[in-house]
């Protein structure tokens, strides 16, 4: 997950630190990269934003 976060930030994306906490990684999450992307967990949201 950390690699995806670094890639997103490298492209100018934003993510709330709340979603990166261990107990929140399996909850619904949203990230921003030229628009908002959501997913059932942080990994899915990151993958949607980066594709």
Image (cartoon, rainbow, N blue to C red):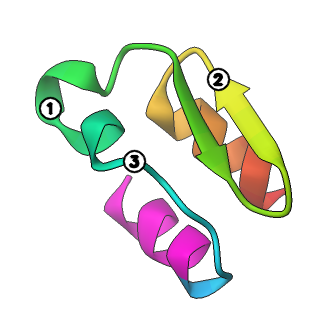
| Residue drawn at (47%, 34%) of the image | 42
Query: Which one is nearer the viewer's eye here, 15 or 4?
Result: 15
| Residue drawn at (85%, 63%) of the image | 34
Q: Nearer the viewer, mark 3 or mark 2?
A: 3
Left/right of residue 48 with respect to residue 25 in the rendered view: right
- Residue 26: image location, x then y, percent: 35, 17
What is the span of residues highlighted in magenta in the rendered image?
1-9
- Residue 2: image location, x then y, percent: 33, 62
Cα gap from disc 3 to disc 1, whole angstroms? 13 Å
Circle 1 crowding by C-alpha within 10 Å: few under 14, some 14–19, many from 20: few
| Residue drawn at (27%, 37%) of the image | 18
Disc on the earlier residue, 1 or 2 = 1
Residues marked 3 and 2 touching at CB (< 8 Å): no
Dominant SS type (magenta): helix
Circle 2 crowding by C-alpha within 10 Å: few under 14, some 14–19, many from 20: some
Disc on the earlier residue, 3 or 1 = 3
Residue 8 quadrant? bottom right
Residue 10 quadrant? bottom right
Determine which residue is flagged by label 1: 22
Determine which residue is flagged by label 2: 39
* Numbered mark located on residue 16 in the image: 3
Cα gap from disc 1 to disc 2, whole angstroms? 16 Å
Circle 3 crowding by C-alpha within 10 Å: few under 14, some 14–19, many from 20: few
Left/right of residue 6 with respect to residue 32 in the rendered view: left
Identity of the residue furthest to the left in this view: 22
Q: Does the segment drawn in magenta span residue 7?
A: yes
Task: Say if 3 sits above or below 35 in the image.
Answer: below
Helix, strand or loop status at disc 2: strand
Q: Does the segment drawn in magenta span residue 11?
A: no
Identity of the residue furthest to the bottom in this view: 10
- Residue 49: image location, x then y, percent: 75, 51
């Amino acid at each position: 997950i950390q690699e995806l976060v670094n890639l997103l930030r490298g492209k100018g994306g934003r993510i709330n630190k709340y979603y990166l906490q261990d107990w929140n990684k399996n909850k619904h999450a949203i990230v921003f990269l030229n628009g908002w992307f959501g997913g059932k967990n942080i990994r899915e949201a990151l993958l949607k934003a980066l594709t």
